[in-house]
Image (cartoon, rainbow, N blue to C red):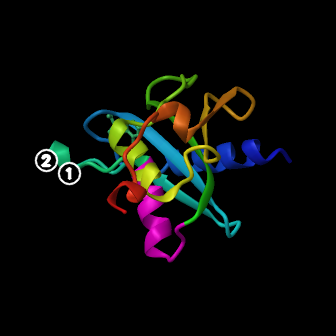
Amino acid sequence: MDRYEELIDMALDARKLAYAPYSKFKVGAALLGKNGVVYMGCNVENASYPATNCAERTAFFSAVSEGQREFEAIAIVGGKDTISELEYCAPCGVCRQVMREFCDPKSFEIILAKNRTEYKVYTLEELLPMGFGPENLG
Ligand code: THU
């Protein structure tokens, strides 16, 4: 099976667990570690809105908290829980910055998917040009 399709399927599964009672916008992410393990994440909202965590960061924090810090790709799916066909859901700026901490801007792949066959692939550098990263702190 195509590696992108497999990751997209896992992101779609992760989206089912999204806790989004306020926005009703459910997001799922599947993050592929260089160890071959896929870490899943969904958005987790909060009555105090800024305490919300995005799906992408949930996946990254889950991976890092399990000891994995090197990554190859992430698949992201998201949209209102009322719609039947998803549009592309791009990661927010904060999540792009979290990716920048752990991923190589030139090779880390960000897969934005509507479904398992309709998807677009970007490098982190394309979505976060001239980013500020760990090497800037020398
Ligand atoms: N959200 C994500 O989880 N990831 C994104 O890439 C965009 C936004 C969540 C945060 C919030 O729970 C809801 O979507 C609406 O912003």
The structure residue drawn at horizontal position 74% and vertical position 48%, both measured from the top left corner, is 6
The structure residue drawn at horizontal position 73% and vertical position 43%, both measured from the top left corner, is 4
SS state under label 2: loop
**Where does residue 14 sit, x and y in percent of width and height?**
54, 51
**Where does residue 110 sit, x and y in percent of width and height?**
59, 40
User: Of 100 and 79, which appears nearest the observer?
Assistant: 100
The structure residue drawn at horizontal position 47% and vertical position 31%, both measured from the top left corner, is 90
Q: Is residue 68 left or right of residue 7?
A: left
Quadrant assignment, res 26: top left
Q: Can the viewer see residue 18 in this picture?
A: no
Which amino acid type is shown beneath numbered disc 1? Ala
What quarter of the picture does the C terminus occupy?
bottom left
Seen in the picture, residue 39 relative to 77 is either above or below; the reply is below
**Where does residue 68 sit, x and y in percent of width and height?**
54, 71
Quadrant assignment, res 39: bottom right
The structure residue drawn at horizontal position 53% and vertical position 37%, both measured from the top left corner, is 125
How far apart, in angstroms, are the residues tagged by discs 2 and 1? 6 Å
User: In the image, is residue 59 part of the stretch drawn in magenta?
Assistant: yes
Query: Contact (CB < 8 A) between labels 2 and 1?
Result: yes
Give the extent of the magenta segment: 56-69
Seen in the picture, residue 14 relative to 125 is either above or below; the reply is below
The numbered mark at residue 48 is 2
Seen in the picture, residue 44 relative to 21 is either above or below; the reply is below
User: In the image, is residue 80 part of the stretch drawn in magenta?
Assistant: no
Q: Which residue is mark 1?
A: 51
User: Of 127 and 42, which appears nearest the observer?
Assistant: 127
| Residue farthest along the bottom direction in this orientation | 67
User: Mostly what secondary structure, the magenta segment?
Assistant: helix
User: Of 3 and 86, which appears nearest the observer?
Assistant: 3
